[in-house]
Each structure stands twice: as C-alpha cells, then as structure tokens.
Image: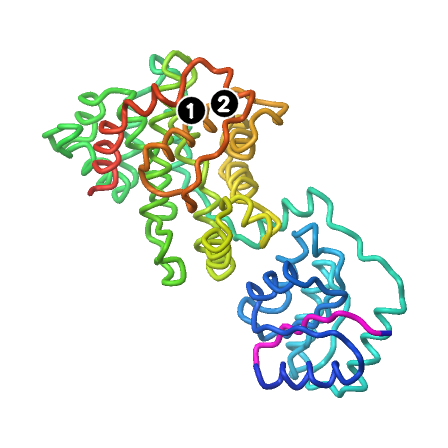
C-alpha cells in the first residue's frame, strides 16, 4: 500500500537516505529539517503519515503537539524516531502518549522495521481522535509557557480597572513602590516632556497626573515589563517588539477615545493587550512565527490568516488564554479573542467591536506595526458604533507623542 509520507529529519543525509528507500518501495515522499518547514510542506502537499525525528529543534513531541492543534493536520499519524538511549526513549514515549501520540520507532531503525511500522498504521484504519476545544486551550497554555503576572502587577491592573472616582490613588502609589523596577519605569515616563512631572515622589506623580494618565502609564509599564526584557530574535527582524508595542499602545489610546463616556475603565488595557498573543508567538515559537511572517510577505495575506494556515491557532486565541492566565476580567479575554470578528461574539460584543475599530484606526494612521500592512474590512456590527475611524485618526499626532513618551523614545 503506497502512501504520501513527510519525513522531518534533522540530519539532511539521513533524511535523504530514508526518502530514497521509501521511494523505492513506491511511496511518495517529501522531507524537511524542522517543524516550521513541516507545516509549510503539509500546506503544500499534505501527508498520510509524518515520520518525525525527535532530535529536531524544539523536540519531536513538542513539534507533534503543535501540529495536533491544527485542525487540518491533527488526524495525520505521527511516528516519532526515538533517541538511542533507552531511558531517554522511555521519557519521550511517556511524554508523547500523554499528548495523544502513540507511534514510535527506536533509531537507528532498519528499512524493514520502518516498513512494518508504516504498514501497521496504514492497514489499521484506526482514526486518530481529534483534540477537544478544551484540550487545545490547555495545549496553548502548556506549549507557550505563558508568563506569570507578578502579584503587584495584578493588583495594579485591578485597582486601575475601576471608574475614575473609585480608584484608590494611595493604594496605586504604595503598590508601585513595592516594585522598584516598575516604579522607576513609571517615574521616567511621568517625567517625560509630554507628561511634564518634575518631582521625585511616586505619590506626587500620581496626584499630579491624575487617574486617567496614571492608568495609561502604569498599565503600559505592567504589560511591557512582562515581555520587555526578552531578547529579540534575528529571525524576526521584520517585526520587532518595539513595532508591536507602538501599535498596541496606540490602539489602547484609540480605545480611550471611543470609550470616553463609559464608566468602566478597562479600555486602554484592552487595546494594549489585543495583540499580546503575537508577543507570545515571538518568544515561544520564533521559528514558526518567522514562517508566518514570510507567508504574510509572499502571499500578501493578513497575519491572522497566516497564523491559522501554519499554526492552526491565532494570536487572538493565545492572547485570550493569557488573559485567563493573568486572571483578568472576562470582558478582556472575550474582547481579545473576538476583536477580528466582533459580530460573531456572544458576550461583550461592543467591547470587541471597539477594539476592532481602534485596530483599524491605528493601522490607518500607520503607528507601529501589527505584523502585516493590511487594513481589515470593517465588521458589520462594529460599523454601527457612533465613533468613526476618521474621528480617531484626527488624534494621530497626540498618539505618536504619547507612545514615544511611554516607550522612552
């Protein structure tokens, strides 16, 4: 029985040898060196079976788990080539089985052993069970190793999410002082030419700038601090964290313009967090994300479409899980998850639509970069809101000055 086989082998010579032998047996074979190349090959040609070397970058099991999140590929049987050391092999088997992977082959294997394994899989006819929605959510959390939110940071976000008149400014000031690094960053921003504070005491800065400004400064510092110390990856030179922060901060400012009359004040936080899943991809899956950006460039598609094509999950999915992990309000998680298609949301639809409009406005202004140069088509539900993109765009010069001050430019 012939089959279409994708060989994912770290060693090019070994991969070439396996492919030649399988072709002699009548199989159609493609090969590549790592997981990011594998998803490109699958998108191009598909496969009936994936033969995956455990020594590939990120490891065979983790690579297979990423593939299992993709609805197009999660029913393709994966055979993991095990390390020679028996104890190491047992650990790989245990980890793989916990993730729903049940086919393994000890390396170095003979052609006859490989053929027996392939024949058993092809003739078994047993369908691989697709992961449930909850299992995919758990996998996003586990694979991306979502960063924790320090207790002081969480407290600050909670304090500042209240209506202006309900914010305890003394508590904000004292909580900031518990974190010297965060306090120093906030103070630098307060002293910028844009915000104009000249003193040295945090309590004075908080009182001088007021709730609305401090909310913006502190929330941006909190989010930036979680990811700000991460090292940039050369593979992602076309899309830097600075690009993303500028885009996200400006989106938060646009959210404030739209939601000015609203009592609850999570608007800036929502805007700033709407693309936070991209930051997770940058730091946890940089090689995969580099392929996403290459696909954006080569096919002129949105980053959302490219993420779905290659990863099976999007930055919106990842950002929503991060919001849960940080114990942020449900409205924050829903708005992040649904900001590309707010009309389809069953909860907090208006907030998601506000983020959608703000994102379009910031892309129109060209502040920062969201990973692709495209301006999304306005969602029909979002178009019903009174505030138009044109009204937000009038604030471009002010947004740019605020962004530069917050980022210390």
Residue 61 image point, x, y percent: 64, 65
User: Where on the picture, by quarter, is residue 391?
Assistant: top left
Residue interval drawn in magenta: 2-11
| Residue under pointer 2 | 351
Whether residue 156 is visible, yes or no, is no
- Picture quadrant where residue 157 is located: top left
Furthest-left residue in view?
Answer: 198
Mark 2, Cα crowd under 10 Å, few <14 / some 14-19 / many 20+, is: many
Q: Is residue 198 left or right of residue 340?
A: left
In the rendered view, tell whether residue 298 sits above or below residue 350.
below
Q: Label 2's element?
A: helix
Instruction: Please tell me which residue lies in front, 394 or 49.
Output: 394
Residue position for label 1:
266
In the picture provided, is 197 more to the left or to the right than 336? left
Q: Position of residue 224 (x, y in %)?
A: 34, 42
In this rendering, position of residue 17 left or right of residue 321: right
- Residue 78: x and y, percent? 72, 66
Q: Are marks 2 and 1 in contact (CB under 8 Å)?
A: yes
Label 1 Cα crowd, 10 Å radius (few <14 / some 14-19 / many 20+): many
Report the front residue among 122 and 204.
Answer: 122
- As measured in the structure, the alpha-carbon distance from the residue carrying label 2 to the one carrying label 1 is 10 Å
Task: Say if 89 sits above or below 204 in the image.
Answer: below
Residue 331 visible here: yes
Q: Nearer the viewer, residue 220 or 393?
A: 393
Q: Residue at x 49, y 38 (%)?
A: 326
The colour scheme of the drawn protein is: rainbow
């Amino acid at each position: 029985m012939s089959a279409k086989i994708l060989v994912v082998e770290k060693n090019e010579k070994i991969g070439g040898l396996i492919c030649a032998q399988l072709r002699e047996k009548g199989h159609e074979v493609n090969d590549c060196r790592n997981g990011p190349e594998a998803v490109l090959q699958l998108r191009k040609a598909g496969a009936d079976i994936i033969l995956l070397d455990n020594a590939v970058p990120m490891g065979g099991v983790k690579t297979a788990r990423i593939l299992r999140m993709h609805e197009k590929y999660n029913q393709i049987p994966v055979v993991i080539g095990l390390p020679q050391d028996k104890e190491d092999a047992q650990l790989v088997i245990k980890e793989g089985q916990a993730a729903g992977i049940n086919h393994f082959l000890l390396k170095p294997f003979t052609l006859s052993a490989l053929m027996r394994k392939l024949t058993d899989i092809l003739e078994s006819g047993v369908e691989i069970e697709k992961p449930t929605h909850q299992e995919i959510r758990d996998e996003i959390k586990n694979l991306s190793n979502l960063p924790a939110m320090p207790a002081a940071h969480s407290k600050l976000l909670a304090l500042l999410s209240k209506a202006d008149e309900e914010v305890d400014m003394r508590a904000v000031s004292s909580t900031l002082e518990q974190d010297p690094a965060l306090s120093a960053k906030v103070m630098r921003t307060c002293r910028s030419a844009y915000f104009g504070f000249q003193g040295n005491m945090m309590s004075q800065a908080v009182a001088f700038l007021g709730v609305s400004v401090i909310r913006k400064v502190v929330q941006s510092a909190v989010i930036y601090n979680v990811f700000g110390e991460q090292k940039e990856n050369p593979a992602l030179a076309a899309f830097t964290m600075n690009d993303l922060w500028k885009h996200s901060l400006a989106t938060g400012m646009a959210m404030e313009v739209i939601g000015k009359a609203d009592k609850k004040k999570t608007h800036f936080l929502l805007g700033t967090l709407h693309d936070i899943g991209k930051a997770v991809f940058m730091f946890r899956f940089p090689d995969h994300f580099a392929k996403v950006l290459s696909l954006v460039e080569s096919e002129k598609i949105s980053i959302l479409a490219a993420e779905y094509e290659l990863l099976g999950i999007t930055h919106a999915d990842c950002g929503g899980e991060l919001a849960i992990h940080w114990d942020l309000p449900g409205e924050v998680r829903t708005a992040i998850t649904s900001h590309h298609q707010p009309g389809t949301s069953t909860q907090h639809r208006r907030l998601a639509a506000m983020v959608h409009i703000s994102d379009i406005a910031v892309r129109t202004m060209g502040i920062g970069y969201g990973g692709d140069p495209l301006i999304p088509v306005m969602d029909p539900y979002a178009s019903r809101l009174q505030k138009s993109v044109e009204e937000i765009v009038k604030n471009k010069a002010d947004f740019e000055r605020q962004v530069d001050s917050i980022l210390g430019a």
